[in-house]
Image: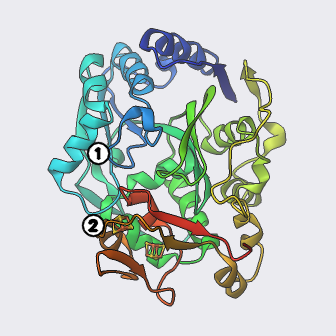
Amino acid sequence: MVSQIVCTTYEEKAVCAAVENLLKPLGGMEAFVKPGQRVFIKPNMLGAGHPDDAKTTHPAVVYALAKMAVQAGGDVLVGDCPGGDISEGSARRALEMCGFEDAARRAGARTVVCHRHRTVRLPRTGFAMETSVEMLDCDVFINVAKAKTHTYAAYTGAVKNLYGVIPGTFKAAYHATHPIALDFINFVLDIAQQMRPALNVIDGIVGMEGPGPSAGLPRELGMLVASTNPHEADWVMIAHMGWQPMQVPSIALATQRGLLNADAIELVGEGIAALERPFERPCRKDGMGNFIRLVLPKGVQRRIRLRPVVGKNCVGCGVCARSCPVEAIAVQGGRARIDPEKCICCFCCQELCPKKEIKARSRFG
Ligand code: SF4
Ligand code: SF4
């Protein structure tokens, strides 16, 4: 079942009422949280950012969920593993800037910087993955995603948000171990199977369009969705964004793997009218072309994928170079330069560039 509700404001009282109504068809928060249980609420905290940038889950949504979980008797932690090689102090500042510190405190919850990790073996492949200890050791895992475009994966919502269970630098490293898009998206689906969130909520009150997940622009959508199945929640949110869900690689692969049957989704609640203009794609020329790439032989995928290029306003800060999993970036003469022979086109650099100066270039124009 997917529950959906229209909500056009981040005004806290309105969001609390909307989230409560959103969860009612799923049995309310009491269906997920029992007194005394350890609850982990995982928003999208890609990095430090103001809530209005739409890069991270809005704190009003986190507040509403944390408050309900506390009222249900849970011992509630809020946290995430931001991307890149960031210190504990920077992660703490990110929690504050994103508004999660304040939201958690007022809701009666606590925040945590997720630096401790443990190895888990993914059942399908046996891959040894470092995972946040706090997220593994909770009784109830609540996944609170943001609806955004994503240059590499086309879209990020409930399923892709689960890549955040991996601590900072390992995120980039696992791009290097899964350099082909098909393998990487399958890896993300494996993580979703491993983590099995009890509840998935997607904040689409304001989403992001264009070159997401961090360099795009906020776009009002007015939707919240929730489900115990992250693939179903994504399917519904993508449809509201005006795209064909099956064109998004994670949806197509989840369907192929039997994790999603869109025809069987039981949809309850109110939705918005169809958008006159769909969400702008991550790359105007062929931002949804990743789907086509996935069905092509791997060698062809490599040749036609979107490539990163450095914009003219690069300030040479080196954040991209430090986040590149294959050391394809060097800062020379005050600006970043990408070695196309080494680059695996993962777009970690775009995600973390503070100046939004990494663009996606299509081979088709
Ligand atoms: S992170 Fe952005 S601004 Fe900094 S060096 Fe890289 S491209 Fe330039
Ligand atoms: S240059 Fe950017 S896109 Fe290429 S591998 Fe490095 S981080 Fe990924």
Q: How many neighbours does mark 1 have within 10 angstroms: few (below 14), some (14-19), or many (20 or more)?
A: many
Label 2 to label 1: alpha-carbon separation:
32 Å
Please, is residue 159 above or below residue 141 in the view? Answer: below
**Mark 2 Cβ inside 8 Å of ligand 1:** yes
Q: Is residue 268 in view?
A: yes
- Sequence order check, earlier mark of 2 and 1: 1
Q: Which residue is mark 1?
A: 134
Q: Which quadrant: the C terminus?
A: bottom right
x, y percent for residue 238: 70, 42
Q: Residue at x 38, y 59 (%)?
A: 352
Q: Is residue 243 left or right of residue 96?
A: right
Q: Residue furthest bottom?
A: 341
Label 2 sits on a secondary structure element that is loop
Q: Residue at x 49, y 16 (%)?
A: 15
Q: How many neighbours does mark 2 have within 10 angstroms: few (below 14), some (14-19), or many (20 or more)?
A: some
x, y percent for residue 286: 73, 64
What scheme was used to colour the molecule? rainbow
Give the numbered dot on residue 317.
2
Q: Amino acid at mark 1?
A: Glu
Q: Residue furthest right?
A: 263
Of residue 14 and residue 160, the one placed in the foreground of this image is 14
Q: Quadrant of residue 336?
A: bottom left
Circles 2 and 1: CB distance less than 8 Å? no
Give the numbered dot on residue 266.
none
Q: Which is in the foreground here, disc 2 or disc 1?
A: 2
Of residue 104 and residue 35, the one placed in the foreground of this image is 104
